[in-house]
Amino acid sequence: MDSVEKKESAERKKTIFSGVQPSGNLTIGNYIGAIRNWTLLQNEYNCIYCVVDMHAITVRQIPAELRRRTYETLAIYIAAGLDPEKNILFVQSHVPAHAVLSWDLGCFTMFGELSRMTQFKDKSQKNADNINAGLFTYPVLMAADILLYQADLVPVGLDQKQHLELARDIAVRFNNTFGDTFTVPDGYIPKTGMKIMSLADPSKKMSKSDSNPNASVGILDGYDDIIRKFRRAVTDSDTVVRYADGKDGINNLMTIYSCFTGKSFEEIEKEFDGKGYGDFKSAVGETVADSLKPLREKFTALMKDKAYLEDIMRMGAENASRIAARTVSKVHRKLGFAQLK
Ligand code: TYM
């Protein structure tokens, strides 16, 4: 890099990439761990947010549902406050470069590395009749997503940390072999809310693929449903609202309440001093239901305008493709592929 390039690169806004799979009803875990933080970062960074539909097919999907959820996920991004003029919002399958780079990077990823991925082990257990190659190579596609855009920062929940570390390892390996090619990305994992737990079993992560409807709270769940689910949340036999070891259910509810109100655990303990779990659960439910109400209303309006969502998808795919093509061309030159001018 010459000095002008160095100056330009220092002045360049950093790039963020992240995504959500349209594989189920998005939960408040997805919101707190990821989407909410994306909205907070959109002014300081060049942000690229993707609906990762290609990741979703590693588990069988009903095609009509996958299509509907793809629109819904994009609408949630916008309804949560992501400005489509400021951010690149797009659908993964609209930019074939993801699959192309994924193949290239797969040749720089070891079988042993992929075998160690805990999410692969979990998902193989849950889908024992369909342990397909895509499920195994899923983290390579995720690395391609991130590295295509030379992302500096990747805001995700804790469950994606291992995948992110693999993406970094792949980038470093490629750079060491072929010279500086990829930006090595850092994770951006929130301190509070990095792992929201199931309301039915607080030792398990809240997940959009959980078959128990009471385990997770959907971003789009109705007002009364949200309150009911929090009232039923599994806690413990203690009665005092305080954050402590062994109180996984209460710790989880305190974390959720803290994320939606900005209050510290100490403040929450004071607020509910002398009150029981019932009052606390109702307060958490009402706060979450109230906070998500504007998002739900905006979502409903957006879903009525498919043409608008398609315009965003089209514009996002064009902008993303332009950036992605630059990286693919650089990688292919380095790999020794013959390139036609
Ligand atoms: P996915 O679709 O499972 O989840 C989307 C985001 O939500 C976070 N998350 C949670 N955070 C806190 N508590 C929870 N209970 C919780 N559940 C989910 C996830 O950490 C994630 O940030 N592989 C990714 C999608 C992906 C991606 C990428 C992300 C594909 N390519 C590139 C970042 C960069 C996934 O399955 O997320």
Image (cartoon, rainbow, N blue to C red):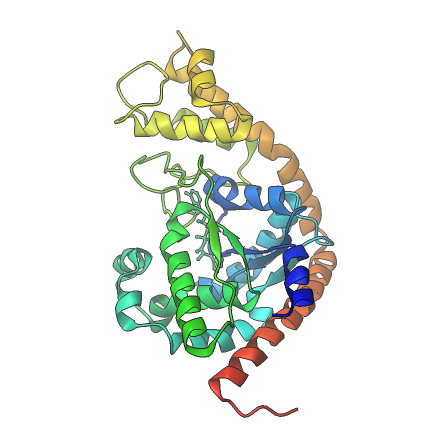
Residue at the limit of the structure toward the top, as seen here: 274
Which quarter of the rendered picture does the C terminus lie within? bottom right
Residue 77 in the image: above or below residue 63: above
Residue at 46% x, 37% y is: 217
Residue 251 in the image: above or below residue 56: above
Residue at 46% x, 73% y is: 102
Residue 257 location, x and y as percent? 48, 26
Looking at the picture, tell me which residue is in the foreground, 39 or 217: 39
Residue 249 location, x and y as percent? 33, 28
Residue 183 in the image: above or below residue 72: below
The number of numbered badges drawn on the structure is 0
Which quarter of the rendered picture does the N terminus lie within? bottom right
Residue at the limit of the structure toward the front, as seen here: 3
Residue 55 location, quadrant? bottom left
Looking at the picture, tell me which residue is in the foreground, 215 or 89: 89
Residue at 36% x, 47% y is: 211
Residue 259 location, x and y as percent? 50, 31
Answer whether residue 39 is visible to the viewer in this image. Answer: yes
Answer whether residue 129 is visible to the viewer in this image. Answer: no
Residue 135 location, x and y as percent? 36, 66
Q: Is residue 249 left or right of residue 298?
A: left
Residue 15 location, quadrant? bottom right
